[in-house]
Image (cartoon, rainbow, N blue to C red):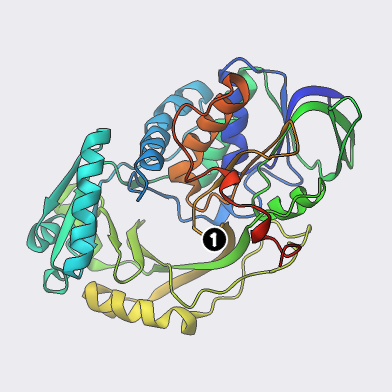
């Protein structure tokens, strides 16, 4: 491991690897990523792998579009398959109020060059045959939805970065970060010390712990998140045989659900209102590739809506329930940018939609570090939108 670097990136999930790649691509090749375990440890490895361009903030949506378009490039640069399936998708509205919101999304998307189209529930059912059109009042078609291989994408970023001159050190646990009198940072690990001009906290589940090493309390909290995978479904097989294509993605906003095909069955994920924090005060350092115990009773209300909106699920078995933690900021947007009062210390964490936003986060942060400007108005992601009033010390 090198003893000096211009930048040390802490965290080998999809966000950290994206930051590493973008820094190297923009000419800062004296950069090293430190990962305490294997790449993808923590949240990345168990992600459902969905990707989409839709976001309530147009500037974030633009970065999501950039992220999706980037996958072909990093696959070619790295030689690593990313497993991208650009299936397209439908965004579903069960109420008139939700449909009005989706119409606003369509207008913003067209301005940004995102191809969106309002369609009827019956037209949505022709594209996504598992839904019951009588349960919805309208829908929006998005041709840029899809899914991918979380491990493949993360390793593609890392391999592309290494080809550009960056370094990746696995099984290297950061134990402390100390600012020297000259302003440089000492990053102390179990394998020695690296002195750096800049440190990027892309610690994911451990972003709080990394922040605390420099006296920073980040407003992030790990939450449990569940999705289920069904047994093979005849409806899926029939659609695949008839069309030669996968069943497209679906997002049911009123049911708090997302769906996609998974082999011969379906994947259904929930963002239930009865959410549950995980390890509220400190993430265990020995947590890596573990999952949490499923709690199907907690997501039962969302599943009841899902089975009503998508009746084919009533007649199939559940093969597996995945329950794993990932981090949220209070408003659900990432925490990105420089930390006031700590020159040379940057954050890229709280990215709960890493495969939709990870590329854009890497682009914005690398621009910010190298050019002094993120290249767009990303106030919705700026870590500076939170102050001391959001910390335990203040309260």
Q: Quadrant of the N terminus?
A: top right
**Image x and y of residue 115, in percent:** 21, 38
Give the residue displayed 51% in from the left and 55% down from the top: 47
Q: Is residue 4 left or right of residue 355?
A: right
Check disc 1 and report its element: helix, strand or loop.
loop
Front in this rendered view, residue 248 or 381: 381
Residue that extends furthest to the top in the rendered view of this protein: 27
Q: Disc 1 marks which residue? A: 330
**Image x and y of residue 30, in percent:** 72, 19
Give the residue displayed 38% in from the left and 38% down from the top: 59
Give the residue displayed 49% in from the left and 35% down from the top: 359
Q: Is residue 158 left or right of residue 264?
A: right
Can residue 289 be seen in this snapshot?
Answer: no
Give the residue displayed 82% in from the left and 48% down from the top: 213
Count of residue discs: 1
Above/below status of 339 relative to 253: above
Front in this rendered view, residue 206 or 191: 206
- Asked where in the image residue 184 lies, by quadrant, the reply is top right
Above/below status of 167 relative to 90: above
Above/below status of 294 relative to 349: below
**Image x and y of residue 72, in percent:** 40, 29
Q: Quadrant of the C terminus?
A: bottom right
Can residue 53 be seen in this snapshot?
Answer: yes
Q: Is residue 270 left or right of residue 371?
A: left
């Amino acid at each position: 491991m090198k003893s000096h670097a211009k930048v040390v990136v802490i965290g080998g999930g999809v966000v950290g690897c994206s930051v590493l790649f973008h820094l190297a691509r923009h000419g800062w090749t004296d950069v090293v990523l430190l990962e305490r375990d294997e790449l993808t440890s923590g949240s990345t490895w168990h992600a459902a792998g969905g990707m989409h361009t839709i976001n309530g903030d147009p500037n974030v949506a633009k970065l999501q579009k950039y992220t999706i378009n980037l996958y072909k490039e990093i696959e070619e640069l790295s030689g690593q398959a990313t497993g991208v399936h650009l299936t397209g998708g439908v965004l579903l509205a069960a109420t008139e109020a939700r449909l009005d919101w989706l119409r606003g999304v369509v207008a913003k998307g067209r301005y940004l060059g995102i191809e969106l189209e309002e369609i009827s529930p019956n037209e949505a059912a022709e594209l996504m045959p598992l839904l019951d059109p009588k349960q919805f009042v309208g829908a929006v078609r998005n041709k840029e939805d899809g899914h991918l291989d979380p491990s493949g994408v993360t390793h593609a970023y890392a391999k592309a970065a290494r080809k550009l001159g960056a370094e990746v050190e696995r099984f290297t646990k950061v134990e402390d970060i100390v600012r020297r009198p000259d302003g440089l940072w000492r990053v102390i690990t179990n394998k020695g010390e690296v002195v750096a001009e800049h440190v990027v906290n892309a610690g994911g589940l451990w972003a709080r712990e990394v922040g605390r090493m420099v006296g920073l309390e980040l407003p992030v909290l790990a939450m449990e998140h569940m999705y289920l995978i069904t047994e093979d479904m005849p409806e899926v097989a029939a659609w695949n045989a008839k069309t030669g294509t996968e069943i497209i993605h679906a997002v049911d906003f009123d049911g708090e659900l997302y769906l996609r095909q998974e082999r011969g069955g379906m994947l259904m994920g929930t963002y239930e209102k009865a959410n549950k924090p995980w390890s509220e005060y400190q993430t265990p350092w020995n947590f890596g590739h573990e999952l949490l115990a499923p709690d199907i009773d907690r997501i039962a209300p969302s599943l009841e809506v899902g089975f009503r909106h998508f009746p084919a699920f009533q007649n199939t078995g559940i093969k597996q329930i995945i329950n794993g933690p990932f981090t949220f900021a209070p408003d659900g947007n990432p925490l990105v940018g420089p930390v006031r009062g700590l020159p040379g210390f940057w954050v890229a964490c709280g990215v709960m939609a890493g495969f939709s936003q990870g590329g854009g986060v890497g682009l914005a942060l690398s621009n910010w570090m190298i050019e002094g400007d993120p290249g767009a108005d990303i106030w919705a992601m700026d870590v500076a939108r939170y102050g001391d009033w959001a910390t335990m010390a203040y309260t």
